Image (cartoon, grey):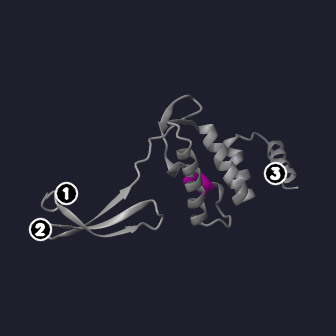
Amino acid sequence: MKCPYCDNPDTKVIDSRHTEEGSAIRRRRECDKCSKRFTTYEKVEEMMLMVIKKDGSREAFDRNKIINGIIKACEKRPVSMSDIQQVTNEIERGLNNMMEKEVESAFIGELIMEQLKKLDEVAYVRFASVYRQFTDASTFVAEIEKLLSNKK
């Protein structure tokens, strides 16, 4: 690893630790030439995932869009930010494990609803109402009845 201070290509690792999430390794390094210390992070290079939207256009996967959608659905509900992060991590991990380069937005929406159903039923219905574009109260009632019948 090249020293960011003097560009010397020879540095040594002093300490290595896993990050809190366990998804990267933090390394403290020291330059052999100038003796300055710096930190580097090593993590697995993730495959670029493209999302195919309803209109057929494509855009890069953005986990922040999932987080924002879940936050809106969970507004004024007893759901912590760590729960939202955990759900988002599960969804992202599942998508990466598929080893696909492209995935339809409808599939991601279904994954979100599946996780929200387990996390908070009100948030699930809120998300479903926007995602599935409920047009009237009877659609809401039908979704709630379906949710209640699955609980029995």
What amino acid is at disc 1? Lys
Q: Which residue is mark 3?
A: 147
Residue 79 placement (x, y as % from top left): 65, 65
Between 106 and 69, the one lying in front of the other is 106
What amino acid is at disc 2? Cys
Give the mark nearer the N terminus: 1 vs 2.
1
Main secondary structure of the magenta stretch: helix
100 above or below 119? Answer: above
Residue 5 placement (x, y as % from top left): 15, 62
Number of the label disc, if any, that sits on residue 34: 2
Between 12 and 58, the one lying in front of the other is 12
Q: Quadrant of the N terminus?
A: bottom left
Q: Secondary structure at mark 2?
A: loop
Q: Secondary structure at mark 3?
A: helix
Residues under numbered marks 1 and 2 in contact, where contact means CB atoms less than 8 Å apart: no
Q: Residues within 10 Å of mark 2 (few under 14, many from 20)?
A: few
What amino acid is at disc 3? Leu
Left or right: where does residue 32 sit relative to residue 1?
Answer: left
- Mark 1 or 3, which is nearer the eye? 1
Residue at image position (55%, 28%) is 56
- Numbered range of the magenta stretch: 67-72
Residue at image position (80%, 42%) is 139
Q: Which residue is mark 1?
A: 2
Give the mark nearer the N terminus: 2 vs 3.
2
Q: Secondary structure at mark 1?
A: loop
The quarter holding residue 10 reads bottom left
Between 29 and 145, the one lying in front of the other is 29
Residues under numbered marks 1 and 3 in contact, where contact means CB atoms less than 8 Å apart: no
Residue 19 placement (x, y as % from top left): 42, 66
What is the distance, in whole Å, between disc 2 and disc 3 at their CAs?
Answer: 64 Å
Residue 115 placement (x, y as % from top left): 67, 53
